[in-house]
Image: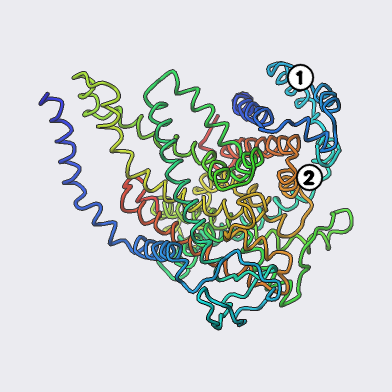
Amino acid sequence: MFAYVLRRLVATIPVMAIVAIMVFLMLRLTPSDPAAIIAGDNANAEQVAEIRKRLGLDQPILTQFVIWTSKTLQGDLGESFFFKKQVTDLILDRLEPTVSLAFFTTVLAVLIAVPLGVLAAYRQGSWLDRIVMGFSVLGFSVPVFVIGYALIYVFAIELNWLPVQGYQRLSLGVAGWLQRLILPSLTLSVVLIALIARITRTSVLEVMNEDYIRTARAKGQTEGRVLRRHALANAAVPIVTVIGLGVAALIGGVVVTESVYTIPGLGRLTVDAVLARDYPTIQAVILLFSLAYVLINLLVDMTYTFFDPRIRY
Amino acid sequence: MSIEVLPAEIAEGVRAARRPGRFALVMRNPSVIIGATIVTFLALVGVLAPVLGTISPSEINPVYRNKKPGAERTIRTEDSKEVQFVHRFGTDTLGRDVYSRVVYGARVSLVVGLTVAVLSVAIGLTIGLIAGYIRWLDSIIMRVMDGLMAIPAILLAMGVVSLSRAGLLAVVIAIVIPEIPRVVRLVRAIVLSIREEPYVEAAITVGTPTPTLLVRHVLPNTIAPLIVQGTFICGSAILIEAILSFLGIGIPPETPTWGNIMAEGRSLFRIYPHNIFYPGVCLALAVLAINMLGDGLRDTLDPRFARRV
């Protein structure tokens, strides 16, 4: 197991190296001169040259890449053009809202989608099955921000149950934190619910005809236990896999959701950075999100042995 | 010469016998019918936009700002007659007619969706064929594709958009790049499996040159899966374009696109939700229709995935 984990970890290095090369080249491919952007409109040629030298942009591209990589590996992501702060500090500052949102969303999505998918498979062809399947097609199609505004309109403006927008740090109290996370998480979870419910239904359907399901029923187990212990347990691996893949959709959704609900997280930071052409921040955020995506999927692979003891590494 | 032609003909005959009227089957699939009808309707709306009772989508009128749906006003036509005009969907913060903007917005969305689908399928097909057929290039290409796929699509698109001035072309390129690896993987997988088919081995044995082999034997096998994939790409491209525009980093705000109309309506959403509601419904409807079309096409055209629900 340990050897396998190590091998898989090593295997992520080439992927991340390619991501790093692409992210690095991004800045060098810009039509505009980054030094000129930092210097601002009123700077003269000398000031621009000074900044270029300070950032090492006058070095050969290979040297620049080596310097950039070693700095990045040490956690130094450069200085933001726009916020005039260290990008690392900027990211650490914005991490909490995004992690809270992503975590809450995933938990919510799994809690809603897995039972729905199992029930849809159990009652295949019934109205419940059709609603779940119809919802899952709808969930893929309705854009996150439309769902977001619809929820705000109903629950925050018309019913006045929850705050409209904003975020409150966890340190200021769990109740306020949770209250402001409900609508954004619900919004973001829709696409994940669609994804997970669909795959749960499919993989439970696949095992429902197996001999061990018939055996379990024959020995008189309740239907609930058959579904949980025998059907769902054997259908778990594809479900966990799709949760891992759903992280990509989650990250895309985070960017939009944070804008709709004005949450000061990494997604908002990305949008602000793109609007301001703040390349060091854009690079850092892309690197960070890609790394998170790759590592989460690695973690998902690791859990296969837990969900299916037949799989051994 | 006759040896070279024969295997392909037999294979074609066998395929035709096994799946009678594959394309006729498509037309009977309910998802395809519903999806295609809505898509055709939206395409007609886009094409016929000028004659659907619209006024200029970019005409600013400060007096008629933020009107609720159904508000009326008198406008002067070209031959200076005065007619009563109804703002069916209301007006936005600059007094532009939301109905006209939504109708014209269909054009942009469909053009973006179609262009992205065609471009990513064409580029992905080329790269995929190369990767599947030239062994030493395969691992290099696939590592690059792995890298591209490790970056979540919207982030990659945002990164690409940030590199150039906002515009239709930049947005199309930004959406095409994240879609390419998915097409490449699909095409490569097909090529690798087709290579093992007896008729391809036979063609290789009789000395068919590689380009002919690719065009005659491999390419036809990629058409059905690529039509399916292209349809889904079209839907996701429309969605991503709307997201980029909504975030203010897509197509310039003057252009009437569904994302831009919604971005415009953000600030006054609490009082005037119609600016978000109408384009949002159109967007959801368009993407839903295209996804239904894609689901139906996959079930009927792509037998390998048909059983997977």
Q: Which residue is mark 1?
A: A58
User: B75 left or right of A206?
Assistant: right
Disc 2 on helix, strand or loop?
helix
Amino acid residing under circle 2: Leu
Q: Given the current orientation, which residue lies at the most extreme right position?
A: A172
Can you give x and y, in whole percent of width and height, for residue B278 in the image? 57, 70
Specify the subunit that label 2 lies on: A
Q: Is residue A161 above or below residue B307?
A: below
Specify the subunit that label 1 lies on: A
Quick check: can you spot residue A292? yes
Residue at x 66% of width, y 49% of height = B249
Q: Which residue is mark 2?
A: A95
Can you give x and y, in whole percent of width and height, for residue B277 in the image? 61, 70
User: A265 left or right of A172?
Assistant: left
- Based on the displayed image, in which of its 4 quarters is residue A13 positioned? top right
Q: Quadrant of the C terminus of chain B?
A: bottom left
Q: Given the current orientation, which residue lies at the most extreme left position?
A: B2
Quick check: can you spot residue A2? no
Q: Is residue B69 above or below residue A139?
A: below
Q: Is residue B60 above or below residue A304?
A: below
Can you give x and y, in whole percent of width and height, for residue A219 in the image? 45, 57
In the foreground, B69 or B79: B79
How crowded pointer 2 is (Cα within 10 Å; few <14, some 14-19, many 20+) is rated as some
Tag of residue B49: none
Amino acid residing under circle 1: Asp
- Based on the displayed image, in which of its 4 quarters is residue A124 positioned? bottom left
